[in-house]
Amino acid sequence: MSMSAMEIRLLRYFLAVAEAHSFTGAAHALGISQPTLSHQIRKLETYLGTPLFDRAARNVTLSSAGATFKPYCDRVLKEIDSGVLAISELKGLMRGTLRMAVFHSFANSGLGPVFAQFARLHPGVRIEARLLPRMEMERDLIAGTLDLAVAYVSEDTEHIDAEKLTQEELVLVVGSQSRLVTGARLQMRRIVDLPLVLLTQEFAARQFLDRFFESRRLQPRVSIEMNAVDPILAVVRNSELATVVSEGAVGKADGARVVRLVDPAPRRSLAILWRRGAHRSAAASRMAEMIRSAYGAGSARSTKAGSPRASKRIA
């Protein structure tokens, strides 16, 4: 007998008895009578041509055939439930809340217009977006309190899948009237000559930069640490201090000038981050599609567990 000939209801009845170890308890949970449930299980056993339960014991237990059948039954019902959920979401396109986290230089990124367009196209979905450091992003993704995040990435982690969007250079930013740096480019080794304003060390952007300096045996002069990019840029505009940030964080900051770092230029990857194995709602999938398009990564696909890029640590 093919699986298509079997009523899905019978599979649910079978799993209910297997979980309750009792026909009485399963019948109560299902809201049907015990004789009805027993009859339906007998019907399933007739279909399969073998007993699924050992009824001789005090507690109902799976027979060897039942134990073999159960994991297949679990998978079938999970796939059906996922399909029903996906269709339900698409029919409503869409409702509910989309919970996201974004990197701290979001204000100067290309994501603002994406969010505005999403809200216009899908008014039934409320976007709940927070600026979070890497550790909090990772914690909330794993806990399931975020649907997705957009962040810079560095080393691997076993719980997060990272879908690469683009690479972005880190640049030196100085005040427009700075006398310490006058050219449009600066060799990386000369950064030790400058007083710097950097993010505090709980930020993965700072951790990435520290590792970059250490790998090249550079010891920068950090004069000020702050926990947000905009205040850092405000300090830089009005002083001889400099900072190193992602190019996208600078935006059109009046009074500031971007200087390219060379030999080498530090680069980081921007990615959409997902909790590995988690269900992706229609709203989250649609938002990811729009973000890919905005960054010219429309053909990108999220990585699979076990591949070389399977997971990256948020930065």
Image (cartoon, rainbow, N blue to C red):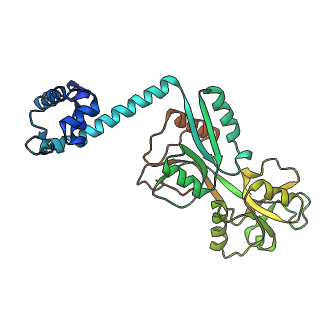
Question: In the figure, 88 relative to 281: above or below?
Answer: above
| Residue 280 image point, x, y percent | 48, 39
Quadrant in which the C terminus appears: bottom right
Image quadrant of residue 119? top right
Q: Is residue 255 above or below residue 18?
A: below
Is 6 drawn above or below residue 150 in the view shown?
Answer: above
The one nearer the camera, 143 or 112, is 143
The residue at 58%/55% (across/down) is 136
Q: Is residue 92 visible?
A: yes
Give percent across and percent down for residue 14: 21, 35
Q: Nearer the viewer, residue 12 or 31?
A: 31
Quadrant of res 33: top left
267 or 248: which is nearer to us?
A: 248
- The residue at 70%/64% (across/down) is 200
Left or right: residue 248 versus residue 311 is right
Q: Is residue 253 left or right of residue 123?
A: right
State the quadrant of the N terminus: top left
- Residue 19 higher or lower than 228, as above or below: above
Q: Position of residue 210 (x, y in %)?
A: 66, 69
Q: Nearer the viewer, residue 155 or 181?
A: 155
| Residue at x 15%, y 27% (from the top left corner) | 35
Residue that protrudes farthest toward the left in the picture? 56
- The residue shown at (73%, 68%) is 188
Visible residue check, residue 1: no
Residue 31 figure quarter? top left
Residue 235 relative to residue 277: left or right: right
The x, y position of residue 246, in whole percent, is: 71, 55
